[in-house]
Image (cartoon, grey):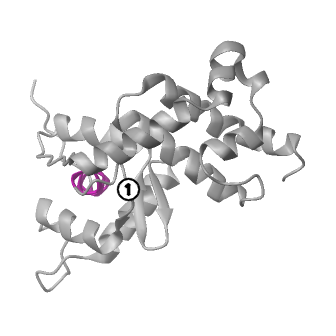
């Protein structure tokens, strides 16, 4: 039976982010608005004029995270898909037969692979693989995602979620699992070293 349900604004915004490489890097919100307008001009235009609507994109982005399933990371004027957001974007593209234009240039692939390989070769990652979370602390995790334990918890979490998204994009399942678990355990790990 064919799918008769129409895509939502959030579906188009997720796909716009995916098309612009938002599963690997921050994308400016204005670029997202232009891409969403290209995908669905009647749904992402000003009321009277044929111009991309930044407000429609902002509303959709806020709605994506309001439902409790963090799908988009925020950084200044940029946005990036979490692993969950990228997975949802791909599934919605398939479900609604929407066009994706994934770009995987060599420079991006090399940089991402090098960063993931650095984390996978970290001694704490090896300890986690052998002994689980009892062998990893907040200092180890901070070193892996290139921050310090004194980094504000929201920024620390954002770095962990960003690496989870990178691992998902480059099909590093075990590392993705590690980062997903790290995101859940982060408050406890920080509390253990006295950071609240």
- Secondary structure character of the magenta stretch overall: helix
Give the residue at mark 1.
25
In front here: 42 or 149? 149
Q: In the rendered image of this protein, does residue 136 appear above or below residue 196?
A: above
Q: Would you say 84 lies left or right of 186 here? A: left
Residue 23, position as x, y percentages in the image: 35, 48
Tell me what residue is drawn at x 57 percent, y 53 percent: 158
- Image spot of residue 190 (x, y percent): 80, 45
Whether residue 118 is situated above or below residue 135 in the rendered picture: below
Describe residue 38's horizontal placement relative to residue 86 as left or right: left
Spot occupied by residue 83 in the image (x, y as percentages of width and height):
43, 40
**Looking at the image, which is closer to me, 144 or 102?**
144
Figure quadrant of residue 179: top right
Region of the chain picked out in magenta, as a range: 9-19
Q: Is residue 154 visible?
A: yes
Q: Quadrant of the N terminus?
A: top left
Q: Secondary structure at mark 1?
A: loop
Q: Residue at x 68, y 46 (%)?
A: 142
Crowding near the residue tagged with mark 1, few <14, some 14–19, many ≥20 C-alpha atoms within 10 Å: some
- The percent position of residue 11, horizontal first and vertical second, equals 27, 50
In the foreground, 178 or 45: 178
Q: Is residue 18 magenta?
A: yes
> Does the magenta portion include 175?
no
Does the rendering let one see residue 69?
A: no
Count of numbered labels shown in the rendering: 1
Residue located at (85% from left, 52% from top): 195
* Outermost right residue: 194
- Would residue 7 be found to the left or right of residue 87 on screen? left
Q: Hey, which residue is sitting farthest top in the picture?
A: 130
């Amino acid at each position: 039976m064919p799918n008769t349900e129409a895509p939502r604004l959030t579906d188009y915004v997720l796909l716009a982010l995916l098309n612009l490489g938002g599963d690997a890097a921050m994308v400016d919100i204005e670029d997202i608005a232009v891409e969403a307008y290209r995908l669905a001009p009647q749904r992402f235009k000003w009321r009277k004029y044929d111009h991309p609507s930044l407000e429609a994109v902002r509303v959709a982005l806020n709605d994506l995270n309001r439902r409790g399933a963090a799908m988009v990371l925020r950084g200044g004027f940029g946005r990036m898909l979490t692993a969950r957001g990228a997975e949802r974007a791909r599934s919605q593209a398939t479900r609604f037969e929407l066009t994706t234009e994934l770009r995987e240039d060599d420079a991006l692939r090399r940089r991402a692979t090098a960063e993931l390989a650095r984390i996978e070769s970290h001694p704490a990652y090896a300890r986690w693989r052998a002994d689980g979370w009892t062998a990893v602390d907040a200092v180890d995790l901070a070193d892996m995602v290139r921050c310090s334990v004194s980094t504000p918890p929201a920024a620390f979490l954002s770095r962990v979620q960003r690496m989870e998204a990178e691992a998902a994009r480059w099909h590093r399942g075990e590392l993705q699992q590690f980062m997903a678990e790290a995101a859940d355990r982060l408050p406890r790990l920080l509390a253990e070293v006295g950071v609240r």
